[in-house]
Image (spheres, rainbow, N blue to C red):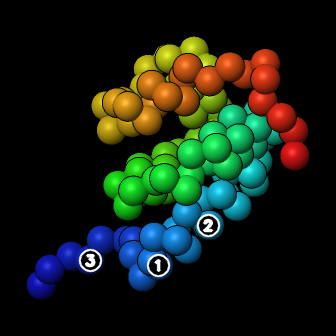
Amino acid sequence: MQKSTYDPHGDLDLENRRRRLKFRAWHRGIKELDLIFGNFVEAFGDSFSEDDCAWFERLFEEQDHEILGWVTKGENVPEAFQGEMMDRLQKLDFMTLKAR
């Protein structure tokens, strides 16, 4: 018997995945990540591919304090999250982010 993979977003089309990401980005649990992810997804989310959405969906399952260290300090970023998207997040100018 084949083992099923958990995919809570698999039945959504790309537009609805982007919409869900935008909501989740502004509702992380700690304000710092709300600002980082919310502003990032607001600015670039409309251009996210399915792979980009999947990357964020996986990232959003991680612990907030670990993610904050990965994004703001580049500390111990797991291989699964290294690459262009993490590089873009790490290059954000955190002083210009706007509160919602």
Task: Name the one closer to the observer, 87 or 57.
Answer: 87
Farthest right residue? Answer: 100
Q: Say the numbered circle drawn on residue 4.
A: 3
Q: Secondary structure at mark 1?
A: loop
Q: Secondary structure at mark 3?
A: loop
Q: Are marks 2 and 1 in contact (CB under 8 Å)?
A: yes
Task: Name the one closer to the observer, 1 or 70.
Answer: 70
Task: Name the one closer to the observer, 96 or 83.
Answer: 96
| Disc 3 packing (10 Å; few <14; some 14–19; many ≥20) | few
Mark toward the start of the polypeptide (3 vs 1): 3
Please state which amino acid type lies under the numbered disc 2.
Arg
Farthest left residue? Answer: 1
Q: Secondary structure at mark 2?
A: helix
At x 55% / y 63%, what residue is drawn?
18
Q: Which residue is mark 1?
A: 12
Please state which amino acid type lies under the numbered disc 3.
Ser
For residue 1, which quarter of the picture?
Answer: bottom left
Kindly tell me whether residue 28 is visible in this rendering: no
At x 71% / y 45%, what residue is drawn?
38
Mark toward the start of the polypeptide (2 vs 3): 3
Query: In this rendering, would 95 be left or right of 78?
Result: right
Residue 90 image position (x, y, % from top left): 54, 22
Residue 35 image position (x, y, % from top left): 76, 37
Q: Say the numbered circle drawn on residue 20.
A: 2
State whether residue 99 is above or below residue 68. Answer: below
Kindly tell me whether residue 73 is visible in this rendering: yes
Task: Name the one closer to the observer, 25 or 88.
Answer: 88
